[in-house]
Image (spheres, grey):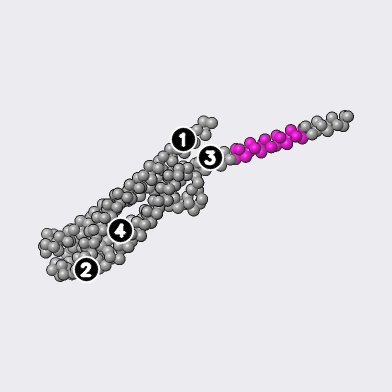
Amino acid sequence: MLTENKFSKYLIYAIGEIILVVIGILIALSINNWNQDRIAHRETEVLLSNLKLEVEENIKDLKDQQNLLKVRKDWADFILKSLDDQKVIDSTMFITAITRVGWIMDYSQMLPTYTEIVSSGKLSYINSENLKNALANYQSQVELNQQITSSYNPALKETERLAIGHLNGMPEASNLINPVSSYKGISFDLKSIATDTEFYKNIKHISFQSAMTIDYISDQLITSTERLKSLIDDEIKSYSKNRQNVQHN
């Protein structure tokens, strides 16, 4: 009887120890899960903040590209008017126009953080399905825009080659916007340029393509990018609110 009592006490003690161990494991797992969630929460906030910065930079770049395209269209229109009128109001401006109208501009809009999110399997960190879809659509839109704009590059290069061929001398290098004060020793034959139908058609195409791209950037790219920024802002606010609730609890 005494032996049975000792065994019973030992069994109860052993069961109690096991229960304590199990409780300890569950608590440890709970703490570990909470810590992992906290780390994932913080990491997501950092990724979203980086995404927002990249999107804001893309919006700025798009507006800069619009301005450059407007300058390029102005150069093209100035050339066309000069050739149509067979009269050059400003020789320096004309040389500037034909040497810059074929310049190639970079339209790349990058979201390296989104690429990192997808490649690292962290897309599930984003709660908003609208944001996930907007990011995927934006990436596809950017890639399509790059393909379209890069298809214009051969014609731009050819236009630049034809333009340089019509100048008697090589003008100094300069950027797209700031004009050169003068082109000493550089001359051109307006009548000869007017007979170059290929050059004229290329200039008309550049004017048209520049105008279309300006509208596309305004109506499509900037609009979708600003919407993407708004969705990212909403997701950041949601994560911040959830983090505050967790801290209070």
Residue 27 colored in magenta in the image: yes
Graded by Cα atoms within 10 Å as few (under 14), some (14 to 19) or many (20 or more), the crowding at tag 2 reads some
Q: CA distance from mark 2 to mark 1?
A: 61 Å
The N terminus: image quadrant? top right
Tag nearer the camera, 2 or 4? 2
**Cα–Cα span, label 2 and label 4:** 22 Å
The answer to whether 154 is drawn above or below residue 242 in the figure is below
Mark 1 secondary-structure assignment: helix
Mark nearest the camera among 1 and 4 is 1
| Magenta-drawn segment | 13-32
Residue at screen point 51% across, 31% down: 248
Look at label 4 and name its amino acid: Met
Please tell me whether mark 3 or mark 2 is closer to you in this view. Answer: 2
Q: Position of residue 93 (x, y in %)?
A: 17, 59
- 1 or 4: tag closer to the N-terminus: 4
**Crowd around label 3: few <14 · some 14–19 · many ≥20 (10 Å):** some
Read off the residue under disc 4: 105
The mark closer to the camera, 2 or 1, is 2
| Pointer 3 residue | 38
The quarter of the displayed image where residue 75 is located: bottom left
Q: Which residue lies at the image location 48% right of the left edge and 51% below the top edge? A: 118
Instruction: Choose the circle earlier in sequence order: 2 or 4.
Output: 4
Q: Which mark is residue 241?
A: 1
Check disc 1 and give the amino acid type: Lys
Q: Element under label 4?
A: loop
Q: Indicate which disc, 4 or 3, sits on the residue closer to the N terminus.
A: 3
